Amino acid sequence: MKAQASEVNKRLKLAKGQLEGIIRMVADDRYCIDISNQLLSTIAILKNTNQIILKAHLESCVKSQLKEEGETKIKEIVEIIEKMTK
């Protein structure tokens, strides 16, 4: 993987911790809105992490295969991905 593994691992561990907390919240019969807010937060972390991985893929694997206008095309794709994941 071309993305910074330490940054990706940090984010995934954060999401894992949040999921474990959500599981405890469900077991403790916590307020549904609180659970939903935590789920949305976890989803946001995972989406952002996916964006980092896809960007790294485009900047390494895809870029090495593009001969002309590679940098421009990659920036365009990254901008679209960022819009889609917000």
Image (cartoon, rainbow, N blue to C red):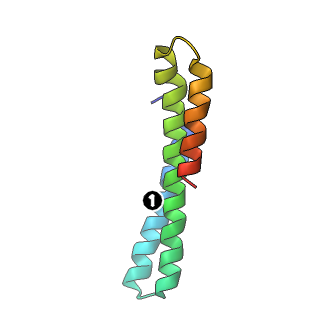
What percent of the width, then of the height, locates residue 79? Answer: 61, 40
Image height of 4 relative to 67, above or below: below
How many labels, in total?
1
What percent of the width, then of the height, locates residue 25? Answer: 44, 80
Q: Residue at x 59, y 17 (%)?
A: 69
**Which quadrant does the C terminus fall into?**
bottom right
Q: Residue at x 54, y 56 (%)?
A: 45
What percent of the width, then of the height, locates residue 12? Answer: 48, 51
Along the line of sight, the residue nearer the viewer: 28 or 38: 38
Residue 25 can be seen in this image: yes
Q: Which residue extends farthest top? A: 67
Specify few, some or many for label 1: CA neighbours under 10 Å numbering under 14, 14-19, or 20 or more: some
Q: Which residue extends farthest left? A: 27
Along the line of sight, the residue nearer the viewer: 24 or 49: 49
Three-letter residue code for mark 1: Lys
State left or right for residue 76 relative to residue 17.
right
Residue 9 can be seen in this image: no
What percent of the width, then of the height, locates residue 19? Answer: 44, 66
Image height of 65 relative to 17, above or below: above
Q: Residue at x 41, y 88 (%)?
A: 29
**Which quadrant does the N terminus fall into?**
top left
Q: Residue at x 56, y 42 (%)?
A: 80
SS under mark 1: helix
User: Label 1, on which residue?
Assistant: 16
Along the line of sight, the residue nearer the viewer: 67 or 13: 67
Image height of 55 relative to 41, above or below: above
